Image (tube, helix red, strand yellow):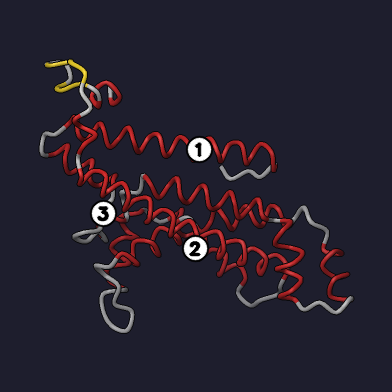
Amino acid sequence: MIFIGAFTKIIMIDNSFTLEHFQSPNGFRSLMTSLKFSFGAALIAPVIGVTLSYILVRKRIPLKRVVETMALLGFAVPGTVMGVGYILFFNSPPLRLTGTFVILIINEAFRNLSVSLEAGVGKLHQIDIAIEEAAIDMGASSFRTFTRIVLPLISSALAAGFVYTFMVGMIAVSAVIFLISPGNNLASLYILAVAEEGFLGMACAISVMLIVVVMACLGGLKLLSHYTKTTVF
């Protein structure tokens, strides 16, 4: 019904073919904003998640379980709760980010941090620690060992985290609905807004474009999981 509604003037009333619903400047603007938002979050989450997985698996740090639990809270806590929490925490100096585009990216990145973290942990358990010990014995520093040896071996976890975070960011609603600001409207929220105003054809058109992007990401994620044997969900 979404696809039919996107290409008909008024679904079930005037079913003549039309492309006028795809000509909304605000719709394309919100879609581009969602792409930038998702891409930004997808750049941050895998890097932090994979690095944190290496620290948790290979290093001895105090309160390791607490750190891991905090990193996994993004999946456990409802998005609405996270949204309200971010408003309260980032609403005063020196971390006043409420109403900015940055807070949207940070929220989405840390909400999906656990995917990259768990993918990294899974890959690290498949790598013999003797490889890293040999590099250190040859004089390489811990940082060089991680960047030149470990990181290439777990690059599939980075890619999986990137694709997953990007895909989920494109359809984010629950947390970002509290953090959105004028000029930073996302496609998922734009669909809700125009649907409430009765422009169902326009809502269907933006939904179709959103579905195409998400399905492409989902297909890429499935291929990545198949060829790298990395399970992300």
* Cα gap from disc 3 to disc 1, whole angstroms: 23 Å
Is 50 drawn above or below residue 62 in the view shown? above
Query: Residue 88's image quarter?
Result: bottom left
Q: Nearer the viewer, mark 2 or mark 3?
A: 2
Residue 14 place in picture, x, y as percent:
13, 16
Image quarter hosting the C terminus: top right
* Cα gap from disc 2 to disc 1, whole angstroms: 19 Å
Q: Of helix, strand and loop, which one carries label 3?
A: helix
Residue drawn at x 35%, y 54% as measured from the top left:
79
Q: Which residue is mark 3?
A: 177
Residue drawn at x 34%, y 36% as measured from the top left:
209
Q: Which residue is mark 2?
A: 44
Q: Nearer the viewer, mark 3 or mark 1?
A: 1
Q: Of helix, strand and loop, which one carries label 1?
A: helix
- The amino acid pointed to by label 2 is Ile
Is 147 drawn above or below residue 17 in the view shown? below
Image quarter hosting the N terminus: top left
For marks 2 and 3, the one nearer the N-term is 2
For marks 3 and 1, the one nearer the N-term is 3
- The amino acid pointed to by label 1 is Leu
* Cα gap from disc 2 to disc 3, whole angstroms: 21 Å
Q: Of helix, strand and loop, which one carries label 2?
A: helix
**Would you say 71 lies left or right of 81 here?**
right
Query: Residue 56's image quarter?
Result: bottom right
Residue 66 place in picture, x, y as percent:
56, 69
User: Depth check: 26 or 82 in front?
Assistant: 26
Q: Which residue is mark 1?
A: 218
Mark 3 vs 1: CB contact within 8 A? no
For marks 2 and 1, the one nearer the N-term is 2
